[in-house]
Image: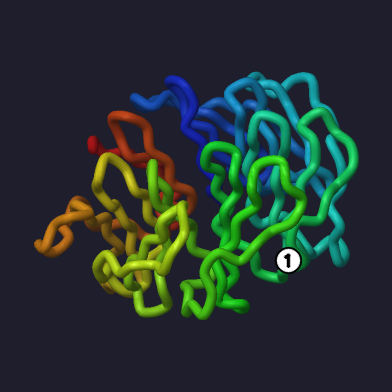
Amino acid sequence: LMVDQLVALGDRLYFVADDEVRSVPKTGGKAKVVYKSDALPRGLASDGKHLYFEEVVDIVRVSLTGSDRKKLGTPDKDGLLDETRELTVSEQHVFVSTAKAVQRLPKAGGKVTLLANLEDGRGLVLDDGDLYFHSAAQGKLYRVKKGEDEAEAVVEDLKLTPELNLGVDAERVYFVTADAELYSWSKSGGAPSRVFELHKRVAAFVVDQQRVHHWVDGEFLGLGGGLFSRKLDSEEASANRMYGIDEVGGVAVDEKRLFWIDSGNRRVMSLAL
């Protein structure tokens, strides 16, 4: 069972398991199949009304019940193995990261627009219509302003952790360096600033309510991975919240709880904030 890509929506969680999109109540219970694919769905995202993901080479949309499938478009790729890595949606667009580029297409379907010709654009996150992502190979943090068609490098000369997500709050964008140090950059510009050091082998992190929650690879800790939390303005070490996490897949957060996929143990987990 391959379990990954988690979306928190309303009172349910949506995730990909092998060739199926499934959902489960946030309070726990039996998962149900929302959509069964002939391929492995990739890059699950939602706008609250539909689910979006890659199927074979196309970006498709289905309702929250799995009906009304619609093909939206096909991103420019280098063959079938160039799978969609990440996907996020705004009011009007779907943003896609592949092994070739970061691209955008209308939610109603149509022309695909190239935003950045990068082989490792990762960490797609939207904030007030602006798209942010990073490239470890280029050592840059990028932004595509709402309504514009080209990415701009807003921070350069970075040593970033490949494949790791970004975090955002009302004023800043957060990223993790190759040395597992958390940095932030003001959306109004300027140089990035160091926040504090996280545990090595960070698998994912979220910034919520002035706290940073981060998950650590189980292989690094030896006895199992862990979840750690720390206030952004605190001088204290990160607090241990949970051990025994084998391999972290997707993560999500709402106003009350953290959610994540423990891929190695084939389960969806949650913990109160």
Is 21 placed above or below 115 here?
above
How many marks do you count on the picture? 1
Residue for point 28% across, 30% down: 256
Residue for point 71% across, 50% down: 96
Query: Visible in this render: residue 171?
Result: yes
Q: Where in the figure is residue 118, as x and y percent of width and height? A: 72, 69
Residue reaching furthest left?
236
Q: Where in the figure is residue 147, as x and y percent of width and height? A: 71, 41
Find residue 58 and report its image quarter: top right
Is 219 placed above or below 90 here?
below
Residue highlighted by disc 1: 99
Q: Where in the figure is residue 43, as x and y percent of width and height? A: 65, 47
**Mark 1 Cα within 10 Å, few/some/many (few <14, many 20+)?**
some
Location of the C terminus by quadrant is top left
Q: Where in the figure is residue 207, as x and y percent of width and height? A: 34, 48
Indicate the amino acid at tag 1.
Answer: Ala
Element carrying mark 1:
loop
Residue for point 87% across, 64% down: 79
Residue 217 in the figure: left or right of residue 232: right
Q: Of 125 and 224, which appears nearest the observer? A: 125
